[in-house]
Amino acid sequence: MHRRIRLIFAIALFSALAVTAAAAQEPGADASWNALKPDVFGERAIREASPLIQLTAPTRAEDAAMTPVSVEVLLPEGDARTIRKLTLIVDENPAPVAATFTFGGARHDVTLGTRLRVNSYSYVRAIAELSDGELHMGARFVKASGGCSAPAMKDEEAALNNIGQMKLRLVNDGQMGDATKANRVSQIQLMIRHPNYSGLQMDQITRAYIPAKFVDAIEVKQGDELVFSMEGGISLSEDPAIQFSYEPSGKPIHVDAADTDGRKFEGALKPAG
């Protein structure tokens, strides 16, 4: 009996130590966040672990240079507010703000996915700003390293030859979903060929650092109405891919994008109504 009690106590103690050790990997990132937060949002209050926002990201990234994340922001039925912005942040990256999306129209729900570089074990955060100014946050701790300095998948010549090629693909037209959720399940994937050099990658032949060169602006319109505009940084992956929800009205989708060298790119899609 005493042996059983000791065994139970030992298991409980081991479990407690394991939980403490696992948790110890995560709180350190809070220091970076606490230092970063005033620079991005000033002294504004942020509701953490908000039920309005769901962030999905892997616990351990298979490829730190292409870590998939997806975000869903959903306001309760009857809530008159709208979703104004969504900011993606990787706390421990050299440039933590990966992208800021500004939405047009009266958006009560938004679904958005992309791929990020994660440079070291870090919290990835999604902060939604509502029309009344409230900030709501979801966060996930991701174990990854070296994402910002990882070598490009293509050599520089090949990457620059294809730069700006754009593809828009209908992922789901919402026809099989509940009509009340159509603008959540109706999604388009935007893909842009671009090396998105971070400035931290080394040319494997010359051993010199490749200057930063990345897509820093995207504007997506449906007819004459803004779906979203994006300001991006070096934390977006090579060949940026953004999957986003839209209202299936049948109006054509048009995309204008630009990079830090002033190059302009554009694409279009005519989804079914």
Image (cartoon, rainbow, N blue to C red):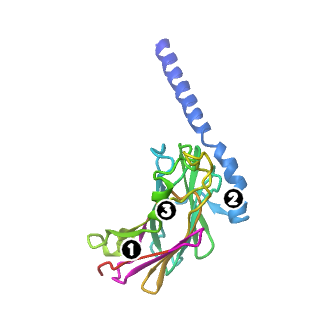
Disc 3 on helix, strand or loop? helix
The quarter of the displayed image where residue 211 is located? bottom right
Q: Is 13 in front, or is 105?
A: 105
Report if residue 86 is visible in the image: no
- The residues bearing labels 2 and 1 have C-alpha atoms spaced at a distance of 31 Å
**Marks 3 and 1: which is nearer the front?**
3
- Quarter containing the C terminus: bottom left
- Disc assigned to residue 149: none
Which residue in the protein does label 2 denote? 37
Q: Is 1 in front, or is 149?
A: 149
**Marks 2 and 3: which is nearer the front?**
3
Which residue in the protein does label 1 denote? 183
On the image, the x and y values in percent for residue 204 come to 54, 45
Disc 2 on helix, strand or loop? helix
Which residue in the protein does label 3 denote? 160
Amino acid at the residue labelled 2: Lys
On the image, the x and y values in percent for residue 271 come to 32, 78
Amino acid at the residue labelled 3: Leu
> What are the residue bounds of the magenta stretch?
240-264
Instruction: Identify the mark nearer the N-term, 2 or 3.
Output: 2
- The residues bearing labels 3 and 1 have C-alpha atoms spaced at a distance of 35 Å
